[in-house]
Structure formats: structure tokens, C-alpha cells
Image (spheres, grey):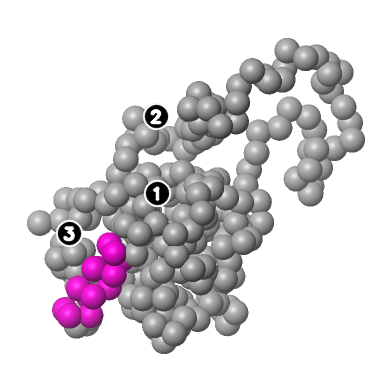
Amino acid sequence: MATGTIHPGDRHCNRLRNGKTDTSGERSKATPKFRRRKFLRPHFISPHSSLSSALVFTFFLSACASSGFSKKVLSDPRYQIQGSGTSSGDRLALWLLDGNSALKPDFALYIALTYIEEARREHINHDVAFVQMCLETGFLTFRGSVNPGSNNFAGIGAVDHHSQNFAKFSSARDGIRAHIQHLKAYANTKPLLQARIDPRFAFVQRGCCPTIFHLTGKWSTDRSYGKKLKNLLDKLYQFP
């Protein structure tokens, strides 16, 4: 069953701030006493350098330290949104059928293979995307506000379990493509390699969620969202 599909990350991402902040998330007019000290501004680091990228990723790891996961877990490629999955189409289909035996095997395999294909095109981890689909739709039982005919596999645009403003797509492939594009918006700042069909793409703070753990509080307000994704991924990897 979907665990909540509010996407506060569409509006903003949490940032580390040195000064006092007001309720709008912007820095207040109160200026720290030593704000103008030059050594606090590291101009020698290029925003395009590999060192800068490493520092940004280190910041994300530190920000998630309070989640209870070690840096080893946070840096595990299995939990990175950008990258490559390892599961085959057959494995994903069988795991989906294990969670929902009412599905037709051919349809389950089609969904699995389409996720792999669309994710590879945008360099997104297809295991993560597929598992998130299972979490959001309850293994395609669609017991929340989103109905099966919408082909919306990620709760895009759904505010709560009673929302009727969720996105609708003309085909399962389009719905999967939109899901992958939405994940890419959260995962990095790279341009899409296919025409954009995700209606919420432009509302995401790009690159705010390099791992599944960062999705907590951004993709969903569920405080256990990242842990639930990890548990499902671990079960997928242990599936016979």
C-alpha cells in the first residue's frame, strides 16, 4: 500500500544554513556578527571540480547520519538512485507476483522489463525505481487514491489518500517513464535524455536526494519512507 505521496521536495530541499531562518525557509535579515569574514567563503573550490562534488556528497552523508544508517550503508550503490540496478526482468516480475498473485504473469514481466529499459535510458537504478513502485502502489493493488487506469506508478501529484489531482498517463510505459524522470529530478541535476512527460519535474529541487534515504521528508512525509524502501530492496535481493 502506498505510504503517502506528498512531495515536499517539489517545493524545496533542506539546506544547511549558518544564520537564523524564518518560516519561509529564507535567511532572515538578522546578520551573524562575523558574517563578512573572508575565510568562511571557500572561493578556491570550483563548483565544477571533482573535489566540490565530493564535498557536496559528503554533506549529504552527514545530513543523513541522524537517520541511524552508517556511512557505509549510505554510500552503498544499491541504495543510490542514480546508477544501475542488478535484478533481471524475470526476478523483478516474480517478486512482483509474489506480492500480488492476482496479476497476470505477462503483465508483471512487461512492467519489469519496461522499468529496466526506461531506467537505463536515464541512468537511474531500476531496482530502486521498481521497489518504489511496489511501495507506492502496494504491488499494483492501488488501494490509495490513485487508480490503475491512471498509469501513475509513483503517486505523482497525489497529495493524500483522497486526492483526485494525481497525474494521469495514456499508457503504462508513459507512466513508468514519468516515474523515472521524477526520480532523476531528485537524484541529480543532469538533463533528461528523452522528452519530458513528468508534469512535476520542474517543481523539484534538482539533485536533493542522491540516495533512497534522502527521499524521506521530500518525496513522502512518512518519516520511515527511506527505511521502508531499504527493507523492500533487501527483500528483493534476498528473493529466491
Specify whether 12 is left or right of 59. Answer: right
Check the image and name the residue furthest to the left.
240
Q: Nearer the viewer, mark 2 or mark 1?
A: 1
Specify whether 101 is left or right of 228. Answer: left
- The reply to whether the magenta stretch includes residue 113 is yes
- Residue range corresponding to the magenta coloring: 105-117
Q: Considering the numbered disc 1 on the image, is that residue within a helix, a strand or a loop? A: loop
Q: Amino acid at mark 3?
A: Ser
Total marks shown come to 3
Q: CA distance from mark 3 to mark 2?
A: 28 Å
Q: Which residue is labeled 2 in the image?
A: 71
Q: Amino acid at mark 1?
A: Ile
Which residue is depicted at the point 45% across and 65% down?
Answer: 194
Q: CA distance from mark 1 to mark 3?
A: 17 Å
- Picture quadrant of residue 165: bottom right
Q: Amino acid at mark 2?
A: Lys
Secondary structure, magenta segment, majority class: helix
Near-viewer residue (138 or 55): 55
Q: Which mark is residue 88?
A: 3
Q: Is residue 201 visible?
A: yes
Q: Position of residue 14 (x, y in %)?
A: 63, 43
Which residue is depicted at the point 79% across and 43% down?
Answer: 26
Q: Considering the numbered disc 3 on the image, is that residue within a helix, a strand or a loop? A: loop
Q: CA distance from mark 2 to mark 1?
A: 16 Å
Is 60 above or below relative to 184? Answer: above
Q: Nearer the viewer, mark 3 or mark 2?
A: 3
Q: Considering the numbered disc 2 on the image, is that residue within a helix, a strand or a loop? A: helix
Q: Which residue is labeled 1 in the image?
A: 81
